[in-house]
Image: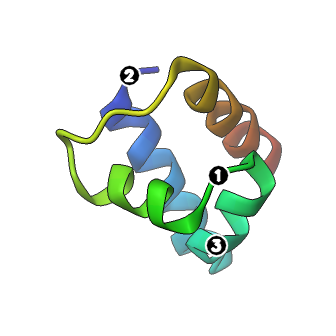
Amino acid sequence: MNDKDLREALFNVHKRFGTPTAFIAHNVGVSREHLSRWLHNESYVISDRLKTKLKVFTNRMI
């Protein structure tokens, strides 16, 4: 899953369940600001480890 698909999956989780960014960030172990910057800025980079945690989170929610 590339960054664009992962962002889209997180936005879908937010849209479907009304999940706040802070809740997602807390569950994957990062700050809300860090996650929000990555979600809304395509040039912002996150680690592969965090991407893996976000993939697991989205799979768990669906």
Question: Are there few (<14), some (14-19), or many (20+) residues within 10 Å of tag 3?
Answer: some
- Tag shown at residue 57: none
Task: Describe residue 42's horizontal placement relative to residue 13 as left or right.
Answer: left
- Three-letter code, disc 3: Ala
Check disc 2 and report the residue beneath it.
Answer: 2
Residue at position x 68%, y 61% from top? 24
**Marks 1 and 3: which is nearer the front?**
1
- Camera-nearest residue between 2 and 31: 31
Q: Which residue is mark 1?
A: 30
Which comes sooner in the sequence, label 2 or label 1?
A: 2
Marks 1 and 3 sit apart, C-alpha to C-alpha, by 9 Å
The secondary element bearing badge 1 is classed as loop
Viewed as shown, does residue 10 lie left or right of 61? Answer: left
Asked if residue 33 can be seen in this view, the reply is yes
Q: Report whether residue 62 is seen.
A: no
Which residue is pictured at 67% across the width and 44% down the height?
58
Q: Are there few (<14), some (14-19), or many (20+) residues within 10 Å of tag 1? A: few
Q: CA distance from mark 2 to mark 3?
A: 22 Å
